[in-house]
Amino acid sequence: MSDIREYVQSHDIFCHHDHHYCYRDFDAQRTKCDYRSLLGYADTDLLVAASLPALQGPLTDAQIAQWWRYARTTGYCQAVSLGCQALFGLAFAPENAEAISAALQASLAGKTAAEVYHYFVHERARNVWTICDSLQAMGLGQALEPEQYPGSYRFTFRLDELYSMVDDGPIATLERFTGRSIQTLEQLAAAVNAAIDLFAETGKLAAIKIGMAYQRDLRVGQPTRAEAERAFVRIRNRAVAWDGLQQHSGAADAATGRALGDYMFHCVLQRAADDDLPVQIHTGYLAGTWGALEGSKALHLIPILNRYRTVRFDLFHASWPWCSEFGAIGKNYPNVWLNMCWAWTMNPAASERALYEWLDAVPFIKIFAYGADTLLPWCNMGYTLQAKQGVTRVLERKVAEGVFSERTAQEVADCILLRNGLVLYGLD
């Protein structure tokens, strides 16, 4: 083992992105967790291997056994194999399904949810800090109940429906959380700020998260207040159409609906600028299948990066498959950090190439190497190992080629694995 390999493998790591359940939700399903719970994103590769447009219900044992052999070489499946072997000493294979399930349940037996998270996230995966993107609206549910997560977790404010409203659901959500009546555009903007205030008071707010690439493209216009007000009235009356989602009221109404989403995007970005809150944005590949990838390029955000120059943008997922473009953005925009969360498992080889390139172009203080992007704590092990393997190979190559000294390679590892995250999120 090289010195840099040993150094990286034993290093604590900052998890920039996860979706972990709160303790209460975890406890509600823990006894049902079996070997399938290690699959994570791999279930979609099994679906692709089977040439199925969609699954009707969860994967069966027979389906996993049939399709695993063809998908086991992908990054998603490699993460499953790495984690299973490291945690339980078992290869993830159909013939080991019963033994894996038994080993997992044995590791949970007698432990509280807090102890389970500590064991898998802290002790085994060595994820010392986690930025959690809650599954509940805006992240407020968990953030307001700090006993529901480890003290090392911080949370994001996320309400993507603000940017792609097709009805007044997001407005109702804000009314419920803030106790405010929202009858005007001005009241909507005030309620968003009130919700962020409520979140900030917990001391657990880390960032604004924008994942709107799953609902719409990343191109954001600059609508007038009048255009946004017209759209608000239509949506409040539940009669809006949304470009790309609904076409019931015609193209004119669709454009007006888009105007409100873009207007609210700017309201949220201005709040981030006022409070010096980092903004995480999903770019690149989309989870699942049939995603509208053409709208998810980070390049679409360039007008926003230019306009909000004091906002610190934490851009996600290496924007794979547009990693080289992503590196150019990191080099050109001082307000951008390049985040490799989830990228290592989407495509380990492409992620290695990306990091190798970026280290020649972007100051390494602006790169984040890891985020698991998982639901369950034991899944972090495989994703952590994938990231560390990739970082190791890149740094070993730089040392072997004489580009880096061992000392420089270690400094780079320190920063991209841990220190850069501590600094951006004020946790150092």
Image (cartoon, grey):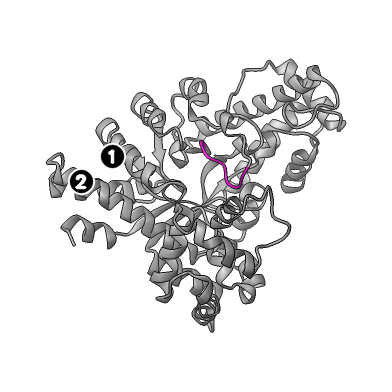
Give the Cα separation between the discs numbered 1 and 2: 9 Å
Query: Residue at horizontal 87%, vertical 31%?
Result: 237
Q: Is residue 355 magenta?
A: no
Amino acid type at mark 1: Tyr
Q: Which residue is mark 2?
A: 397
At x 60% / y 26%, what residue is drawn?
266
From this viewpoint, is residue 152 visible? Answer: no
Residue 233, percent from left and from top: 83, 25
Q: Quadrant of residue 340?
A: top left
- Tell me if 368 is positioned left or right of 38 in this view: left
Q: Quadrant of the N terminus?
A: bottom left
- Where is residue 24, by image quadrant? bottom right
Secondary element under disc 1, as helix, strand or loop, is: helix
Q: Residues within 10 Å of mark 1 (few under 14, many from 20)?
A: some
x and y, in percent, of residue 295 in the image: 58, 29
Q: Is residue 196 left or right of residue 253?
A: left
| Most common SS among magenta residues | loop
How many tags in the picture?
2
Q: Considering only vertical position in the picture, is 49 above or below 351?
A: below
Q: Check whether the beta carbons of the residues at disc 1 and disc 2 lie within 8 A of each other.
A: yes
Q: Is residue 13 above or below residue 244?
A: below
At x 26% / y 57%, what residue is drawn? Answer: 8
Look at the image and give the residue range highlighted in magenta: 283-289
In the rendering, at what x and y percent does residue 427 appear? 39, 51
Q: Which residue is mark 1?
A: 356
* Position of residue 428 measured from the top left corner of the image (x, y, whole percent): 34, 51
- Which residue is more in the foreground, 117 or 283? 283
What type is the residue that disc 2 sits on? Arg
> Is label 2 in a helix, a strand or a loop?
helix
Nearest to N terminus: mark 1 or mark 2: 1
